[in-house]
Image (spheres, rainbow, N blue to C red):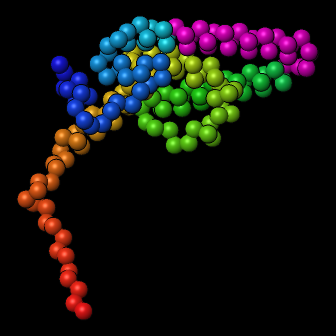
């Protein structure tokens, strides 16, 4: 039994679950490899489907004959948002994001970048595994270093008697 498994069975900090993986990331058990493969394939398939839908949208822009300038602005907008969504999603795997609500519009437009970041990270580990492992091991270290107070060292509070 590994150190992490021993720590999980004792009373103490519980590992945080990751979407699609639960707590299998701790010991890489219960189908962890298959889940990673499915997450990578699913995110790549979703990115491909999203790219196809965007292709249909851009085809609609060209059929509407609104001009190359507007089409170019739309294309650059989606590309920039995808790059920014990729970057912020990738950084979110190693550090807790400050405010996710502010980035909802960016992720809605640049969803392909976020899906590609999820795909690339799934090739090496569960997305967010390194961050959660670091936090979990720090919590285990804090628990191990915390010493319970013994009954002898604790000083009982002296009760003051009231005189009347």
Does 64 lie within the magenta span?
Answer: yes
Residue at 82 percent of width and 11 percent of height: 59
Q: Seen in the image, is 81 located left or right of residue 152?
A: right
Residue at 27 percent of width and 34 percent of height: 137
User: Where is residue 157 drawn, in percent x and y?
Assistant: 18, 70
User: Where is residue 122 drawn, in percent x and y?
Assistant: 45, 16
Taking the image as drawn, is residue 78 in sight?
yes
Relative depth, front residue between 42 and 67: 42
Question: What quarter of the picture does the N terminus occupy?
Answer: top left
Q: Seen in the image, is 60 located left or right of residue 7?
A: right
Q: Seen in the image, is 53 located left or right of residue 69?
A: left
- Overall secondary structure of the magenta section: helix
In this rendering, the answer to whether 68 lies above or below 101 is: above
Relative depth, front residue between 62 and 6: 6
Count of numbered marks: 0
Per the rendered image, the range of residues in magenta is 41-68
Residue at 64 percent of width and 29 percent of height: 107
Relative depth, front residue between 111 and 74: 111
Residue at 45 percent of width and 29 percent of height: 93
Relative depth, front residue between 111 and 145: 145
In this rendering, the answer to whether 92 lies above or below 52 is: below
Q: Seen in the image, is 129 located left or right of residue 74?
A: left
Taking the image as drawn, is residue 121 in sight?
no
Pick out the residue farthest to the front: 164
User: Where is residue 147 drawn, in percent x and y?
Assistant: 16, 48
Pick out the residue farthest to the left: 152
């Amino acid at each position: 039994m590994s150190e992490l498994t021993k720590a999980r069975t004792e009373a103490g900090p519980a590992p945080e679950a990751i979407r699609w993986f639960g707590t299998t990331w701790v010991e890489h058990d219960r189908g962890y490899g298959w889940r990673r493969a499915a997450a990578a394939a699913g995110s790549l398939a979703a990115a491909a489907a999203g790219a196809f839908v965007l292709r249909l949208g851009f085809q609609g822009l060209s059929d509407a004959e609104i001009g190359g300038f507007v089409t170019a602005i739309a294309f650059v907008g989606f590309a920039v948002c995808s790059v920014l969504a990729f970057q912020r999603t990738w950084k979110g795997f190693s550090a807790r994001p400050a405010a996710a609500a502010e980035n909802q519009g960016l992720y809605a437009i640049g969803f392909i970048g976020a899906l590609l970041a999820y795909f690339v990270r799934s090739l090496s580990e569960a997305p967010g595994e390194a961050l959660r492992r670091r936090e979990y091991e720090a919590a285990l270290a804090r628990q191990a270093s915390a010493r319970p107070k013994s009954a002898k060292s604790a000083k009982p509070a002296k009760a003051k008697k009231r005189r009347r």
